[in-house]
Amino acid sequence: MLTIAALQIGSDPRGKAATLERILAFETDIVVAGAAVVVMPEALLGGYPKGETFGAQLGFRLLEGREAFREYFDNAIDLDGPEVAALAELSARTGASLVVGIIERAGSSLYCSALFLDPRIGVAGLHRKLMPTGTERLIWAQGDGSTMPVVASRAGRLGAAICWENQMPLFRTAMYAKGVEIWCAPTVDERDIWRASMRHIAHEGRCFVISACQVQPSPQALGRTVPNWPDARPLMAGGSLIVGPLGDVLAGPLMNDTGLLCAAIDPADRVRARFDLDVVGHYARPDLFQLKVDETPRASVSTFRTPD
């Protein structure tokens, strides 16, 4: 048996340094639990600015919105920065593979990303959200097929889908074909229907699913104003859970609280579950249906020199 976990916490409104402190404070909990894998929420380092408009109107942008974006950009994470180094050290000290939601800064663009950290080698992979949802597209660039890794861990092969990417059936199929065994779902979606989706994915892919959601108090408690938001309602109520490969809930949902949510798993349950359903194997019909996946890195500028 092995232990896998979701760390349900929220971004600290004081910024990424304070959020990193929140993460590091759970080191003892991770060690005591003996967690082989710990998944953390979407946009945990860098923040998910729920309710922020960035002063954007159709056809024009306000100066105060540009300033809000500058502050958000400054709070984002560089892959070679101190936050990633600290997470790699945490992974090494605890022996746990970490999957962490970050706002990644690359050039002048931001990506909503999931960072994979391995206790032996440090950064082991990166997934950039392929399709930001709704007005997220105002602040986040789209990832491409080159950042869709499946990463080895002692609990199994890890893959990540961020928030509503989980509702992209072709993306799910591509990840199943890569042999994902532990499906990591960093999110800020707290709804019951989200948890139903997590159970469906576990049952469909015959994999373990770890969903980690942020938990945040009401905007009023954070000193923020969100239009039309009830004062007492939490901005994010959590709901992290862990699901087995037949769709059974193994732990959670954890509501309205921080904590390390753990479940003991038997990796052999994946094989038992796929006895009667393997959606990219014996239950597929490649004579009728085929999916083509382009994993080419997409750069807007390619430089070359012609031979003399």
Image (cartoon, rainbow, N blue to C red):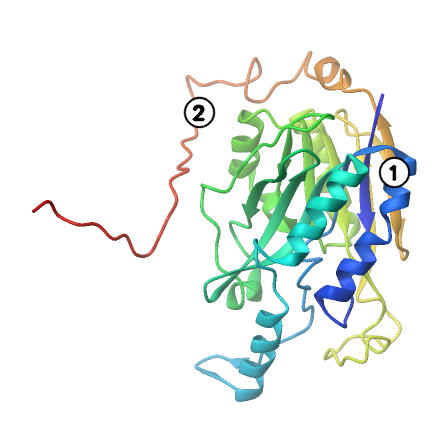
Near-viewer residue (303 or 265): 303
Across and down, in percent, residue 73 comes to: 57, 70
Which residue is rendered at x = 60% and y = 79% of the image? 68
Does the rendering let one see residue 253? no
Vertical relation: 294 (above or below) 54: above
Residue 64 lies in quadrant: bottom right
Direction bottom: furthest residue: 63
Mark 2 is on which residue type?
Answer: Phe
Residue 94 lies in quadrant: top right
Q: Which residue is mark 2?
A: 289
Which residue is rendered at x = 61% and y = 44% of the image? 167
Vertical relation: 51 (above or below) 137: below
Apparent side of residue 230 relative to residue 103 in the rendered image (left or right):
right
Across and down, in percent, residue 299 comes to: 35, 52
Is the residue marked by circle 2 packed among few (<14), some (14-19), or many (20+) residues within 10 Å?
few
Residue 269 lies in quadrant: top right
Q: Nearer the viewer, mark 2 or mark 1?
A: 1
Does the rendering let one see residue 62? yes
Across and down, in percent, residue 105 comes to: 54, 61
Which residue is rendered at x = 86% and y = 49% of the image? 26
Q: Which residue is mark 1?
A: 31
Mark 1 is on which residue type?
Answer: Val
Vertical relation: 151 (above or below) 269: below
